């Protein structure tokens, strides 16, 4: 049976415009976080802020882990088979709900231990965890919007979620009523407001087609999701396990330096993450080797330029912004900035692997890199502290990045060399993007 057509925008946005919109969407939450952070700190104090962090940490963790790759599977399936959009959404929502309920049960069961015996943290944790399933369902909507290249809606979701959170905090702070309970509810509930960006989304889709090929079956969605989920978990471990292991390996002082260095070095990832998201959806709907490689090269150039700007100035502003005691973070951040920049081409290559139906290959690269990273952390952190952790991250990023590119060449014939350097066509694309931005800014 022929799949029905779908009401799509008359003109698909260009890739450069899509990336620009996504950058704005990814940047706004960081700006809002910088504004809301001091509000929470001043209103709650150190102890109160710790209570809220402890109460909301399980929500943050399980909404990352319990996706099981279903939003990405939704993007992949809808991008490849637009006529199955409604069916895919329904089944993805069902899988996500089951996963969310199980995750909620796990948190509730472990709440006594996770709360450290604090009745207040325990109670607030049980309140926050109620938002797990709705948060996961928003991810499914985001996956569908990404498949249809509706990057404006995806950006609005992030702007609504972070902006409304800040607006909700302000009146309670100004009136002196911002306590741990109010803060926990706002932090847990406000991300759900991002769903407002997807109102009317279902009107774009025709009646569901019969899935005669099984592309949108529960098995297909869960199978694809699990293959990409393994890599996602490995990626989280690769980027965050070092902070967990540093205290027993070298002490909290070195961890304090490292956390600041990580915060600074991850700023260029706003660009790379935006390019990766757009590339995944675009390549899933229509694979193009030249476009994939160009996206990697341009992302590499922009991230490297951003990282170079940070590296050239951070010796001055890190001690002033964070305090003179954090000056040693500068050399650690320098290593991490190099790691972020050099990992960019392979990150885009990994999006290409997932978009072409081989997410397990990307996961393999991340699993191998994660294992090597753990070994290097154990070896390097005791004698070198934060610097050793940064070096381990550098090796891990290089390994995962280039493994992605080698696997992409082996299975899809895309030469590794295409992902490095800058071509004249890339310069023209960058010039056109800059011109477009300047025109819109007038």
Image: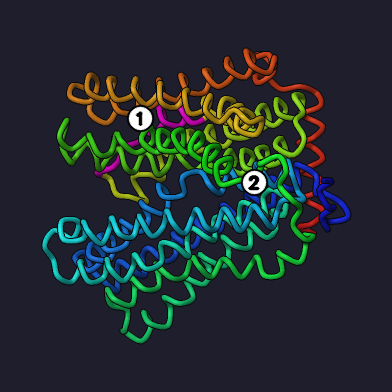
Give the farthest residue toward the bottom. Answer: 175
Instruction: Mark yes or no: residue 44 visible.
Output: yes
Q: Quadrant of residue 327?
A: top left
The x, y position of residue 202, in whole percent, is 71, 65
The reply to whether the C-beta atoms of the residues labelled 1 and 2 are less than 8 Å apart is no
Horizontally, residue 186 falls left or right of residue 191, namely: left
319 up-or-down from 185: above or below: above
**In which quadrant of the rendered image does the C terminus lie?**
bottom right
Disc 2 is placed on an element classified as loop
Residue at the left extreme, as displayed? 117
Tag of residue 216: 2
Q: Is residue 331 magenta?
A: yes
Q: Is residue 357 above or below residue 58?
A: above
Disc 1 to disc 2, C-alpha distance? 49 Å
Q: Position of residue 76 (x, y in %)?
A: 65, 41
Of labels 1 and 2, earlier in sequence is 2
Circle 2 Cα neighbour tier, 10 Å, few/some/many (<14 / 14–19 / ≥20): many
Instruction: Kindly tell me whether residue 338 is visible in this rendering.
Output: no
The part of the chain drawn in magenta is: 325-340
Q: Quadrant of residue 332?
A: top left
Q: Nearer the viewer, residue 409 or 300?
A: 409
Q: What's the colour scheme?
A: rainbow
Position in image of residue 178 (x %, y %): 32, 79
User: Residue 224 at what x, y percent from top left?
Assistant: 55, 37
């Amino acid at each position: 049976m022929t799949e029905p057509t779908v009401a799509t925008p008359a003109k698909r946005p260009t890739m450069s415009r899509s990336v620009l919109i996504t950058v704005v969407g990814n940047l706004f939450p960081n700006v809002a976080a910088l504004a809301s952070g001091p509000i929470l700190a001043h209103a709650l104090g150190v102890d109160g802020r710790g209570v809220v962090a402890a109460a909301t940490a399980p929500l943050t963790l399980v909404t990352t882990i319990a996706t099981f790759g279903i939003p990405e599977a939704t993007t992949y399936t809808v991008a490849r088979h637009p006529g199955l959009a409604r069916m895919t959404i329904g089944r993805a929502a069902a899988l996500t709900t089951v996963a969310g309920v199980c995750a909620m049960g796990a948190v509730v069961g472990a709440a006594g231990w996770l709360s450290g015996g604090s009745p207040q943290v325990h109670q607030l944790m049980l309140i926050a965890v109620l938002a797990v399933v709705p948060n996961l369902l928003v991810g499914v909507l985001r996956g569908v919007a990404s498949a249809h290249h509706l990057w404006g809606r995806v950006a609005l979701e992030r702007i609504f979620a972070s902006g409304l959170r800040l607006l909700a905090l302000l009146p309670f702070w100004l009136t002196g009523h911002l306590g741990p309970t109010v803060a926990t509810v706002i932090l847990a509930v406000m991300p759900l407001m991002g769903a407002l960006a997807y109102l009317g989304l279902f009107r774009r889709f025709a009646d569901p087609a019969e899935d005669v090929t099984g592309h949108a079956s529960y098995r297909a969605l869960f199978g694809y999701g699990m293959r990409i989920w393994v890599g996602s978990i490995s990626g989280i471990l690769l980027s965050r396990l070092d902070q967990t292991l540093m205290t027993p390996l070298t002490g909290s002082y070195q961890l304090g330096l490292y956390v600041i260095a990580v915060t600074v070095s991850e700023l260029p990832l706003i660009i790379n993450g935006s390019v990766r998201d757009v590339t995944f959806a675009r390549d899933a709907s229509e694979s193009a080797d030249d476009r994939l490689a160009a996206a990697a090269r341009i992302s590499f150039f922009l991230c490297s330029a951003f990282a170079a700007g940070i590296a050239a100035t951070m010796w001055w502003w890190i001690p002033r912004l964070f305090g003179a005691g954090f000056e040693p973070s500068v050399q650690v951040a320098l290593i991490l900035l190099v790691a972020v920049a050099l990992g960019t081409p392979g990150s885009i290559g990994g999006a290409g692997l997932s978009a072409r139906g081989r997410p397990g290959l990307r996961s393999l690269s991340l699993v191998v890199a994660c294992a090597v990273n753990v070994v290097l952390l154990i070896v390097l952190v005791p004698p070198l502290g934060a610097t050793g952790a940064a070096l381990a991250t550098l090796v891990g990023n290089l390994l995962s990045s280039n493994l992605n590119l080698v696997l992409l060449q082996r299975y899809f014939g895309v030469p590794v060399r295409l992902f490095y350097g800058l071509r004249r066509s890339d310069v023209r694309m960058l010039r056109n993007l800059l011109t477009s931005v300047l025109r819109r800014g007038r």
